[in-house]
Structures are given as C-alpha cells and as structure tokens.
Image (spheres, helix red, strand yellow):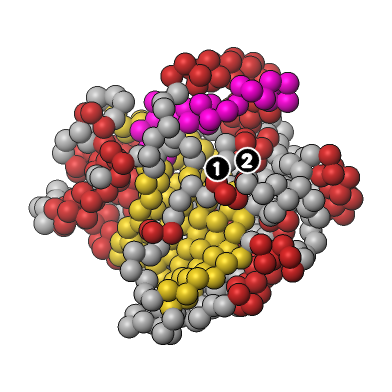
Amino acid sequence: MKSFSSLSFASDHAESLDLAFAAVQKDPQALFTDFQWFLFQGKDTIFFTAFSKESFDKAKLKELVKRVVALAPQLTHGFAGARPGHPFTETQLDAITSVDLVDDFEGYPDKWLGKSEDIFDVPDLPLFRFMAATRKGGADGEGRASIIQVRAAHAVLEGSDAALLTRSQTANHGIQSNKANKVSLGTRIKGALAAGLGASIHLFFAHLLSPPEKPWEFQTLPLERSRIRRISNRLGVRQRSLYFALVTYALHSAKDRRFNDEVIAAAYTMLDTNRTAADDDFFRVRALMAKFPFSEDFVTYVKGVDKALDEIEAKDVTAFSVQMMALFKMHRTLHRHMPWLYGPRFRRFQGRTDTVLTLVPPHRTFGPVTEWMMEPIYCGAFHAGANICTFCPGREYMTLNFTMEPRHMEMVSAIEPLIDRIETMALPAHDKPASHADA
C-alpha cells in the first residue's frame, strides 16, 4: 500500500467555514462533495470496533467522542442543524453515545455488527454513533474490560481516517484534490460524456435487474500477520495479493459463486498520492476494477492476482477517476429533479462484481485517543447489495471484516483451512522477493 497522510492541498479554510453556516441552513449536505453525496444517498455506513483494557462509562465515552471530533471535524457536518467545526452540545452527546453492561464478551464483535441504517433515522443528529459494552465484573481473563464500536455514515469517515485516529493524529480532510495538477480538457469532456451515458445505463439496469431485498450477514476473522507474511515470502507475491486471493478463492472458486467462469471480478480500493484536479475533494481513496484470471490451482491463481494488480496500477487511472467523479455529479444533478429514481432498487444494484475488497492503511495505536485499545482491531463497511471484505492491518493481526449475503458468508469458514493447506504445500521457487510495503 502506498503511504498516506492527513495532509491536504491549499485552501481558504476560514472562507469555507463562513460559507458553511449559510449553506447548511438550506441543505444539510451542501458541503458534501458529489462522492460524499452519493454515499450518503446510498445510506452506506462504516464500523470500527476494538476491545479496551479500560472500563468505559457514559462520561468516559463522551470524552472520547470529543477527542475524536476535535481530530475529525468532518463529523460535525451533514445533518440538520449542524454547526460545522463547532463542539457538540451535551444533549447531542447523550443522544449519540450508549453504554451497556454485559456479563461477558461472548460473540463480540460480530453480534454487534449491522447495516447501521438507524444513523439516518433522526435528521438532526450527527451521522455517527459511539457504543460501549462494559463487563460487569471488570476485565476478563484476556484483560478486556470493555468493547467500543464507532458506527458512521461513510460520507463522513473513510478507512484512512480510522488509521489516523488510532495514532491520535488529525484526520481533517481539507482539500484532497490537487488543483495545480490539471487534467486536460479532452479528458474532462470525455469524462462528462461518459458520465451522461453511464448514468442513463446505470439507472436503466438498476431498475430492470436490481436483485430483491436479501438477508445480510456480518462476520469478522482475525489472522496473525506473521503467518501470512511467511506464506507470501514462500510464494514470492505481495501480502496484499495473497489476502485478496485467499478471500476471492474461498468465496468464489465454485462456478455458481461467480458471474464469469474465467475470472473473478472484484472492485478494490487504494490510496494514491498522485492527486489531480479531477479527484474528489474529500476522499483520499480511489476505486479500481480488477478481473482475476481463475485457476483451480491456488498457486497459479495467487500469482495471477499479483500480476493483475501490477498491470492495473502501472496504468494512469486519471481518465477512470474523471469518469467516476463526473458520474457522481450527474447522479446528483438528476436526483435534484427526479429523486424518485434513487430508491432502494438503485442502491441495491451492484452490476456484475463478485466482491469488493478494501485494504485500509495500518491501524497502529498511539497517543491519548487510543491508549485504551487492544488488538485485534476491526474495521468494515456496508454498501447495499455489495459483498465486501475489508482488510484492517494492525501490528500483530490482520482482521478480515465481511458484510455479505449468506450464500457467500458460509464460505468464509473455508479461508483458514485454505491457509492450512498452503502452509503444507511444497511450493516452487519464486523469481522475485515479496514486497511488504502494502501491508
């Protein structure tokens, strides 16, 4: 994975705040970029959860909220009555925090996870919630006294924010596009034309082919990073490629579990420091599409995944990024005039993508915001209709966080036996060293 930081490009922050107060009175989402708006309309959510060696009560949880909001002021945006950049009132803090007393942590964190649609139920509350479950008898045999979960609209938080906050660093976004790195007029025109056509096709097929509402399940799986590192070294592939291959092979190796016999189609995300004027002003992450050539032989498959990632990331993805940003803008414009087109059927339509893979930056706890936190750390996302695996690396563990329809979730249990089998293989010598920079 490429490096990331909380730095942004130059902007007039004072002027932005002045405009903010006037804008949000008419439209609470007025400050959202087109990408933020798209995720907000989709009711897309994220979760972050970890056990604590300290016991949390209501007062302590509210103090944690204050610290986090000070480092991530975008959490003060996007809801009716918002005062961007200002602290929350005690009434607001009471409404967005909750503490339960429990006998033990059996089933956590999975029993806590869900779609988090309740975040959008009360228009005048912030778009996030902090929850704690505290053990009645104090810390258990593993030293766990509480478990904390943060749930938020994806429109106001992304994976890199969680990584920065675990280090007690600012996650203020500022302006993420690089206005000095111009995109050619021809590329912008092509992007706009593609967006117009793409939005029409998207809407048509979403209403024609959108699947019915299905049950949705949530599950986490912690893996020791040292174990995966040893295997990737033996295979001569990047750890990221191995993680992607393990999940997609386990979930989609059977023909009836993928759209195409020849490939497994995946959307995946990455951070890119080569920002342009066409990039989103809020999100640091970029989404890319991949087709991994399928092979029954896992070694052949994982090497194909590694090669596919190399080929995709060697290309200039500016044109694709321009098209995606133009598509979000087009949908926002159409929604303004025809909101009835953007209901649940539109949100559930995901095309012919088997899985969405998201590798967030390393979550390394440091400083006063996370001094209570214990590994493993869990971080994931829910997008209606999308089968998602979010990979969250800590110092010792990589957690795999699944939000999927049941028929795919039942195959998560095949991942650890697959790892066991690979470890016993007599693997052929590889011709290049594995890179660990992306994990």
Q: Quadrant of residue 244?
A: top left
Q: Secondary structure at mark 2?
A: helix
Rendering coords of residue 236 (x, y %): 26, 51
**Which residue is disc 2 drawn over?**
40
Instruction: State whether residue 82 is above or below residue 368.
Output: above
> In this rendering, would 15 be left or right of 273?
right
Tell me the CA gap for discs 2 and 1.
6 Å
Tell whether label 1 touches label 2 (CB within 8 Å).
yes
Q: Which mark is residue 328?
A: none
Q: Is residue 240 visible?
A: no
Q: Is residue 338 above or below residue 63?
A: above
Residue at coordinates 80% horizontally, 61% vertically from top-left?
Answer: 86
In percent of width and height, residue 151 lies at 55, 56
Q: Which residues, given as a range, are shown in magenta? A: 334-357
Q: Judge whether 101 appears above or below 76 on screen.
A: below
In the rendering, which numbered label is found on residue 44?
1
Is 266 magenta? The answer is no
At x 63% / y 40%, what residue is drawn? 40
- Return the x and y of residue 408 as percentages of the image width and height: 29, 40
Classify mark 2: residues with Cα within 10 Å, few (<14), some (14-19) or many (20+): many
Q: Amino acid at mark 2?
A: Phe
- Say whether residue 356 is magenta: yes
Image side of residue 26 versus residue 428, left or right: right
Asked if 264 appears above or below 281 in the picture, the reply is above
Determine the residue positioned at 44% across, 35% down.
385
Q: Nearer the viewer, residue 63 or 432?
A: 63
- The local secondary structure at tag 1 comes to loop
Q: Badge 1 local density, few (<14 within 10 Å), some, or many (20+)?
A: many
